[in-house]
Image (cartoon, rainbow, N blue to C red):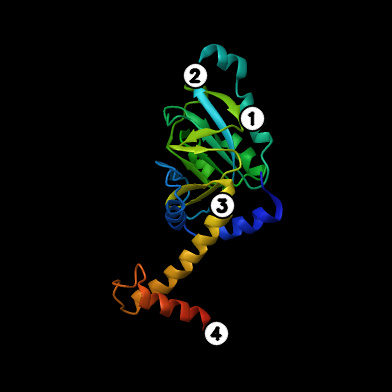
Amino acid sequence: MAGGQHDEQLFAELRAVATATLAAQLRRHELDAAVLSGLTPLAPGQKLVGRARTLRYLPFREDLAAAKGMGVQRSLIESLAPGDVLVIEARGVTDAGTIGDISALRARERGAAGIVTDGALRDAAVIASFGLPVYFSGTNPAQPSRRHVPFESDVAVACAGVLVEPGDVLVGDDDGVVLLPAAAAAAIAADALAQEEEERFVAARVAEGESLLGLFPMGPEWRARYEASKERPPAR
């Protein structure tokens, strides 16, 4: 997994762009299957950026549940580091919780950047008070053991319809969550920043009364004007 100064720069860039922009860039990079579906942000207005640490829940089975308990989940939470995102595969099952307030609090105290689960939350109102970005598919007061066995961690998982590998970069905002494969994250971030700079120029022209025709997307005339605007020194 990447880390250190490289991650700091990458994460700063990703905090500056919207998931809608990243989704467009993922498509341009032929990675259209990297937008997580059906997730809701627990608290609007937060930004999630971090690298995936994965937890796989399998269907409840009495003998395995008795043998494993919650040990896999707790061990993973205790190993979280700053910038990690806890990603839980729960098969879309929402009639039992996948994480509650105590475990979520411990994840925050370990420095986790957020939690993403395609299952349900317990203690959702309390977790919302932690200031930790969380994305989920529902709420349910039942304990995980009603439907789940925390089976293994730091493996490839399927969460919200997307294959997530440990170390992949996750970005979330009010629109939802997207995944950037680790090897492509820096290139996608750079292209997204360039797209948003271009779109700010377009939005300013639209606000001045310009038609979208030839402007969005940019035709040759507007492209030339945009490139010229970037070469001009800023007004004082």
Q: CA distance from mark 4 to mark 2?
A: 63 Å
Label 3 with label 1: CB-CB less than 8 Å? no
Badge 4, how many Cα within 10 Å: few under 14, some, many 20+? few
Q: Nearer the viewer, mark 3 or mark 2?
A: 3
Residue that sits furthest to the right in the current view: 4
> Disc 1 or 4, which lies upstream in sequence?
1
**Percent of width and height locating residue 212:** 30, 71
Q: Measured along the vertical axis of the image, is residue 157 above or below residue 21? A: above
Q: Residue at x 51, y 23 (%)?
A: 58
> Disc 4 or 2, which lies upstream in sequence?
2
Instruction: Pick the residue in front: 212 or 209.
Output: 212
Q: Name the element at disc 3.
A: helix
In the rendered structure, which amino acid carries the disc numbered 2? Phe
Query: Would you name the residue on which mark 4 appears?
Result: 233
Q: Name the element at disc 2.
A: loop
Please indicate, yes or no, whether residue 52 appears anywhere in the rendered image.
Answer: yes
Please indicate, yes or no, whether residue 122 appears anywhere in the rendered image.
Answer: no
Q: Measured along the vertical axis of the image, is residue 205 above or below residue 119? A: below
Q: Residue at x 28, y 75 (%)?
A: 211
Query: Would you name the residue on which mark 1 appears?
Result: 74
Query: Would you name the residue on which mark 2 appears?
Result: 60
In the rendered structure, which amino acid carries the disc numbered 3? Ala
Residue that sits furthest to the bottom in the current view: 236
Badge 3, how many Cα within 10 Å: few under 14, some, many 20+? some
Q: Name the element at disc 4.
A: loop
Q: Could you tell whether 112 is left or right of 92 in the image?
A: right
In the rendered structure, which amino acid carries the disc numbered 4? Pro
> Disc 3 or 4, which lies upstream in sequence?
3
Badge 2, how many Cα within 10 Å: few under 14, some, many 20+? some
Picture quadrant where residue 160 is located: top left
Q: CA distance from mark 3 to mark 2?
A: 35 Å
Query: Would you name the residue on which mark 3 appears?
Result: 185
